[in-house]
Amino acid sequence: MIRLVLLSLALAGPAAALAPDTSLRPAARADYSDEGTNAAADSTEGKAVSVPPEDDAGLRRTIVARLSAANRPAARPDSVAETVIAAQLLQRWERMEPVPRADPIEEFPGYEGVDVRAFAQASPQAVATALRPILRTKELVQKAMARQQERRRGQICGDPAIQGEAVGYLPGRINACGIADGVKVRAVSGIPLSQQALIDCTTARALKSWVDRGLKPAVGNAGGGVAEIRIAAHYACRTRNNQPGAKVSEHGKGRAIDISAIRLRDGTNMTVLGGWRTQNQGPILRRAYGAACGIFGTTLGPDSDRFHQDHFHFDTARYRSGSYCR
């Protein structure tokens, strides 16, 4: 047992003599001057290796200089790690095949003649182009700010996505009609209305929610997407379905809006009357209509009754039993 310990100490002696006193650290990056000179500075000795970077050979000479015994004395503890790193990089460089490129790389000052993409293949962690954002021009920033200010000026109901004009209190010709705080909505979530809809903010917010969560997903990319919403009716002081003796409609309170068609960006008009029972437009219109149930208090369509064959009726009336959807 004692002989085994003595033998281990004898073998470890030379290895311990060669072990570095400090942890191995990577070589410092070169400091590139404005003149395009690659100066690999030695932080301890104060020496520098200056190599013109006009071609691939110049970069190769820089690597070879790293291996030079004159510039990296063996007495320095960290020279072992730097020598190994430089040797590996030189081997990879010599094995590389040139990568053809159509245009010269101009993002790297001082390396105009070097195939940077080919050099990047030497390391899986290297990148061939600088990772930096593209600066916006002053004109682009000014236009974006102007559009943002325009949206703020046109917003109503406290939501920039709802564009229009505040009206305020609107009395009705009979006591049951009128709007306490009316607005004229011209667009919601970037989709214009065929005419300004006079409603209250609760109904305006519900319309915006339906456009975002129901209409746009239902249409998708069909015809290029939604271009316009065709409004058939909004505020009107009248009875339900214009029937004599009936209760005042939600339209008379600014809580209802009727939609007769959806125009797509390619010019297609998906009308409720003509498209509801077709194979191509019907499924889209049904999905959009079905999504309104719950967002609005009442949803009525072609399958509801004879009064709604050509439009969707949405209103924000609230019932104890929940939303009324037919």
Image (spheres, grey):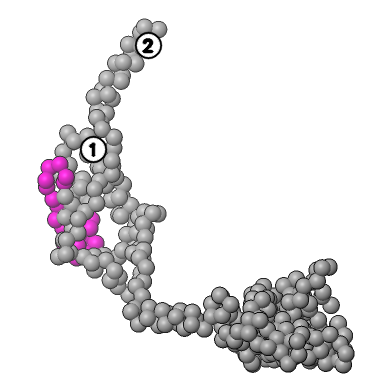
The residue to which callout 2 is attached is 4
Residue 292 on image: x %, y %: 74, 75
Span of residues in magenta? 42-60
Q: Who is closer to the viewer here, 272 or 29?
A: 272
Indicate the secondary structure of the residue bearing disc 1.
loop
Near mark 1 (Cα within 10 A), the count class, few <14, some 14-19 or many ≥20, is: some
Q: In the rendered image, is residue 248 in sight?
A: yes
Residue at 54%, 77% in the rendered image = 160
Decide: is 47 above or below 147.
above
Residue 306 on image: x %, y %: 87, 89
Q: Looking at the image, tell me whether mark 1 or mark 2 is earlier in sequence order.
A: 2
Residue 326 on image: x %, y %: 84, 77
Residue at 74%, 80% in the rendered image = 315
Q: Which disc is residue 78 wearing?
A: 1
Query: At label 2, which amino acid type do we have?
Result: Leu
Which image quarter holds the N terminus? top left
